[in-house]
Image: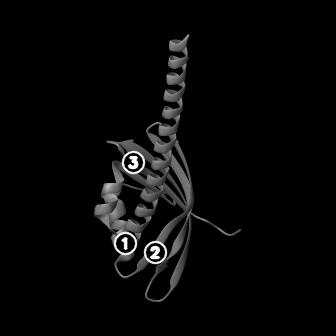
């Protein structure tokens, strides 16, 4: 009887430990994903192609207002936009879902594009798909669209 109790106790402790570790990993992943989204926005705003390359998968794709961009096309677009302008952007209140080695999120983007003659507020909605590869999360796809005030 004593052995059965010990085994039952051990299995209960092991089960709760596994749940706790899974919860901690999920919290760590959640925090990591939020950081990835923030870092992605900051790198876009600065035109930091090295950071973008590190954050994104090799087959990354951006869907922006009906156009499709791979990483190199994104870099060219950023360079053109930032040649004589500056930008700030950050994700606001991301909603993140994780399942196995995939995650997806959506959020609004706040920020602005400053040209020599005007400041244009950013009013965007973005959706992101991330893949867990080599123990880290990488951005595989971003869809972005303007928010209209109807």
Of tags 3 and 2, the one toward the viewer is: 3
Name the quadrant containing residue 9.
top right
Q: Mark on residue 148?
A: none
- Farthest-out residue, front: 2
Image coordinates of residue 114 in percent, x first then y, are 46, 82
Image coordinates of residue 4 in percent, x first then y, are 53, 13
Between residue 3 and residue 135, name the one nearer to us. Answer: 3
Q: Mark on residue 88?
A: 2
Location of residue 105 with respect to 148 vertically, above or below: above
Location of residue 3 with respect to 92 vertically, above or below: above
* Mark 2 neighbour class, 10 Å CA radius: few under 14, some 14 to 19, many 20 or more: some
Identify the residue under disc 3. Answer: 137
As drawn, is 59 to the left or to the right of 144? Answer: left
From mark 3 to mark 1, how far is it between C-alphas?
A: 21 Å
Q: Earlier in the sequence, mark 3 or mark 1?
A: 1
Tags 3 and 2 touching, CB below 8 Å: no
Q: Residue at x 42, y 57 (%)?
A: 36
Of tags 3 and 1, the one toward the viewer is: 3
As drawn, is 46 to the left or to the right of 28? Answer: left
Image coordinates of residue 98 in percent, x first then y, are 51, 43
Q: Mark on residue 46?
A: 1
Q: Residue at x 43, y 38 (%)?
A: 101
Q: Earlier in the sequence, mark 3 or mark 2?
A: 2
Q: Quadrant where the N terminus lies? A: top right
Task: Say which element carries label 1.
Answer: helix
- Farthest-out residue, right: 150
Task: Say which element carries label 2.
Answer: strand
Q: Residue at x 44, y 50 (%)?
A: 141
């Amino acid at each position: 009887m004593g052995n059965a109790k010990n085994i039952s106790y051990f299995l209960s402790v092991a089960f709760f430990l596994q749940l706790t570790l899974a919860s901690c990993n999920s919290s760590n992943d959640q925090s990591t994903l939020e950081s990835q989204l923030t870092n992605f926005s900051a790198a876009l705003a600065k035109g930091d192609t090295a950071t973008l390359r590190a954050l994104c998968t090799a087959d990354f794709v951006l869907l922006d207002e009906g156009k499709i961009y791979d990483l190199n096309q994104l870099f060219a677009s950023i360079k053109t936009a930032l040649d004589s302008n500056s930008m700030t952007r950050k994700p606001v209140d991301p909603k993140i879902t994780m399942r196995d080695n995939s995650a997806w999120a959506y959020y609004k983007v706040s920020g602005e594009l400053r040209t020599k003659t005007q400041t244009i507020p950013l009013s965007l909605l973005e959706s992101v798909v991330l893949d867990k590869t080599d123990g880290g999360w990488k951005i595989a796809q971003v869809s972005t669209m303007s928010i209209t005030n109807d």
